[in-house]
Amino acid sequence: MKKTDISRFTVETEKLPSEFVGYKFIVMSDLHSNTYGIDLHEINRMIIKEKPDAILMTGDMFNGLQKDNPIQVMRFIKTLASHYPVFFANGNHEYRMKLDSDMYDDRYYVIRDYLTEAGVVFLEDETIALEKDNACIQLSGLEIDRVYYRKTDRVTMGKSLMAHHLGNCNKSLYNILLAHNPIYFHRYAGWGADMVLSGHVHGGMIRIPSLGGLVSTNIELFPKYDSGMYRYKNSMMLVSRGMGAHTINLRINNNPELVVLNILPA
């Protein structure tokens, strides 16, 4: 089995209510039905040791492939949801299954209904409040069209698209946005996201010391956002290297990654 890294990040912000001191998130992305072959029992043990308050999944936990078998990951997520609040935003693979019923039949809805019944909250262009004591922060899940994932002729994201998908942002609250594709960070920040959680790039698949990821899943050499924390104006974005692979089952110098995120009141 492949080794999985734990990456830890802590940020401080004056917008976070003091009631959320010590609040811990686990961030997971790009498991891709575990076709890469990590030990999900070990991942579960790692999560138990961290004692998170919530688990945030930023998309592509499943594979949009006709022959894919999602049941192992469905059961894994169900197990997590029996112990922790789990929030799920779709990536391009889930969105592909959702749209193309001719190819995938009702697979997406079978997955979603199974996990929803287990307690998983799907955020499909939705915003909810995370509450603790008498305070709250906002958590949103963005679902963008497939044209924004093209390997060539990718379209530009207009300024109004975020509001079209999620409505206007309540900037008086601290806003966490689950947005699978990191390349539109400036638009997420412009909408009002204080913390963006992304994946999609798989850490650049092949990581070169001192240079970072070599190539993104969009076949972009040395992608701008491949791993770790980034800042744009007053917003931060955390990009996970993900936990799997698809099509080209390749990760070099690039272990699967489980992310632990602490957001503290400044």
Image (spheres, rainbow, N blue to C red):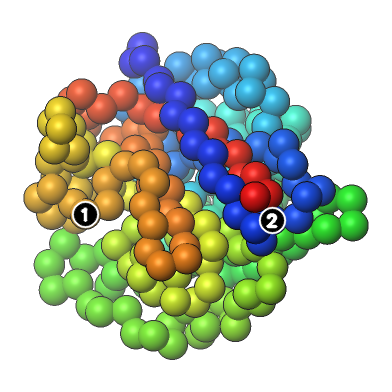
Q: Residues within 10 Å of mark 1 (few under 14, many from 20)?
A: some
Residue contact between numbered discs 2 and 1, judged by CB atoms under 8 Å: no
* Quadrant in which the N terminus appears: top left
Foreground of the two, 48 or 98? 48
Which residue position holds label 1? 224
The kind of residue on which mark 1 rests is Lys
Residue 97 appears in view = no
Secondary element at image label 2: loop
Indicate which disc, 2 or 1, sits on the residue closer to the N terminus.
2
Give the distance between the C-alpha atoms of the residues marked 2 and 1, in whole angstroms: 28 Å
The residue carrying pointer 2 sits among few (fewer than 14), some (14 to 19) or many (20 or more) residues within 10 Å by Cα, namely some
> Is 61 on the left-hand or right-hand side of 214?
right
- Please tell me how many numbered marks the rendered image carries: 2
Which residue lies under the disc numbered 2? 16
Residue at 60%, 83% in the rendered image: 168
Where residue 69 sits in the image (x, y, percent)? 43, 36
Seen as rendered, the residue at the extreme right is 134
**For the point 34% across and 85% down, which residue is it?**
158
Residue in view at x 39 percent, y 74 percent: 187
Can the viewer see residue 255 in this picture? Answer: yes
Question: Helix or strand or loop: what does disc 1 sit on?
Answer: loop
Residue furthest bottom as drawn: 160
Residue plotted at (53% across, 73% down): 192
The x and y percentages for residue 141 are: 55, 62
On screen, residue 221 versus residue 225, left or right, reads left
Relative depth, front residue between 250 and 55: 55
Q: Amino acid at mark 2?
A: Leu
Residue 104 spot, x, y in % from top left: 40, 55
